Amino acid sequence: MRDRSTPELDVPSGPKDGIDEGKRLIRLGGDKGLSLAERLSEHFHRLTWRTPIHGLRLKGRHPLKLIAVPDDPFLGDVKRGHALLEGMLTFRGEAHDIETLDLAKPVFSKGFADYFHSFAWLRDLSTVATRAQATPIAEHLMRLWLAQHADTVSEPAWRADLWGRRILAWTAHAPLILSSADLVYRSRVLNTLARGARHIDRNAEKAPQGAPRVAALCGVVAATLLIPGGDPRQSAVEAALLRGLEASIYEDGGNVARSPGAQVDFIMLLTCLRDVYDARRLEPPAFLAETLGKLMPALLGICHTDRDLSSWQGCAPYGVAALSQVIEASGVRTRPLRQARDWGYQRLAAGSAVLILDGAPPPVARLVEGGCASTLAFELSDGRNRIIVNCGGARAGIAQLPADLAEGLRTTAAHSTLVVGDSNSTAIHADGTLGRGVAEVELVRQESEASSRIEASHDGYARRFGLIHRRQLVMTNDGKELRGEDVLLPAPKRRKVQPSTFAIRFHLGLGIQLSPTADGMAALLRLPGGGLWQFRCRGGALAFEDSLWIDAEGRPHATMQLVVTGEAPAGGANVGWVLKRAH
């Protein structure tokens, strides 16, 4: 029986989470997406799906049944489940009547299409319905999908990562889709499952690096274990999964997309796969537990004391109950990672305060679309209240969120950090990728009996403005005071510094009441529940502007932000500020 207890939080961890003083993090090839040759190769590879040769590769034995049916270790979304019982497929503000669903001419958003084709809705349905209630709905949607996609290999339905997720969903919820007395239908489901497994067996390692590749490979392993005749290939597919994990997860346990949402996704995928081994009463390969043991500390390291995720790389909070369930189901009991290297998120925790800093370059362009220019931004919480946040939510895929607003949430200005010349520290391209900007981050972290100190700098404004941004953060060991300094310095090897304006933005958490002081250089921040913090600055003019914050449901909430502005002459600029608990 696995230990399902709640992980410990903020207990000092061992030397493995230390970081070398003066550590330099470099974004190798950061602004380079896929080359023309790589894009052409991908295109021609997809074209081969339509050839008779690929059709022959998909042929094989028709399975009569599954060897075992694994448990789904996770609960689904209750609201979406109840909507399904009422005849509606819903996802992130988008809704479609299942009786009039037209898969031949779908009008889905990308997020909704991924949700539908992955069959993640089976988890939502099974969470709220009895088998008798859920089976007719599941079979109806399955028949629609089979009629349109079972015999036609095309995207997005046959995308490798979606097939991987679909295999995990179909096998875990087999009672909902394979209970029919219609033997022709049952045979079609099982044969399509086998064909899909053969399809991604040849394509999984060509899926994009990161969660897409790992999802596809988890599906290959699950199919090998659950479809009769797959056992001889077990070692080979496990070796492929190990390669995929090594290419997608850093040594410190963070993922290459630097995405909190992807981190949760990895944990859920590997936990589901572990339950496949349990269903077969087989011992999982050692690397499965080892990888989960690395992923979880990195995830906890970016959680606030409200036990929910901070907002990084376009992700919003996950939801306290949902995240707690993921952590418990993983069976991993561990401590938060405080000092990540490649993952890049630094954690300061003292008293009831937690600070999380983005101390690394953004993810490289070829690995992720929708990345954010957030280097050296931070979030701060006190107990269950978030004081300083990032707006987050650019990847939430909310139907009601305008596209231009979603893109705006990726900018440096949507994060609590310094902005020069109203521009991004790393360029954001129209195709969703990140371009030139931050290439190197240098970071020093020191701990003493009185305080914890992080000093970091990045070169994102060196090319355009000839300036380096250096940020120093010092938190007292009682967690009641945070002192900061933001400095703009002339970049080395730049002949001329371009005078520029700057703005240091501090986006405030939901429900914080803002009261400016009489001298205009400070503000009182009243937290929900009565806590009071004071903000004061020197070296710039303090102003107050509207802001917004995206919650775990993907909904935007109106908030406020503190903005310290000034001019950066040739010699640079220096702004000092302090956040102090008043009582």
Image (spheres, rainbow, N blue to C red):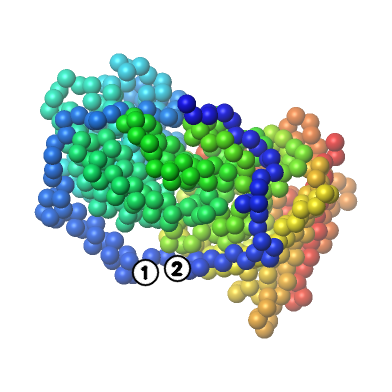
Q: Residues within 10 Å of mark 2 (few under 14, many from 20)?
A: some
Which image quadrant for residue 532? Answer: top right
Q: Is residue 12 left or right of residue 1?
A: right
Q: Residue at the spot x=48%, y=68% of the render?
A: 29
Amino acid type, label 2:
Lys
Residue lying furthest bottom = 495
SS at circle 1:
loop
Q: 561 or 571, which is in the foreground?
A: 571
Q: 410 or 197, which is in the foreground?
A: 197
Q: 345 or 241, which is in the foreground?
A: 241
Q: Count how many numbered circles sit on residues in the image.
A: 2
Which image quadrant for residue 413? Answer: bottom right
Q: Position of residue 2 (x, y in %)?
A: 49, 29
Q: Is residue 581 above or below residue 444?
A: above
Q: Which residue is mark 1?
A: 35
Q: Residue at the spot x=58%, y=44% of the render?
A: 297
Q: Which residue is mark 2?
A: 32
Distance CA(mark 2)–CA(mark 1): 8 Å
Q: Residues within 10 Å of mark 1 (few under 14, many from 20)?
A: few
Q: Is residue 129 left or right of residue 354?
A: left
Q: Is residue 497 visible to us here?
A: yes
Amino acid type, label 1:
Ser
SS at circle 2:
loop
Q: 439 or 111, which is in the foreground?
A: 439
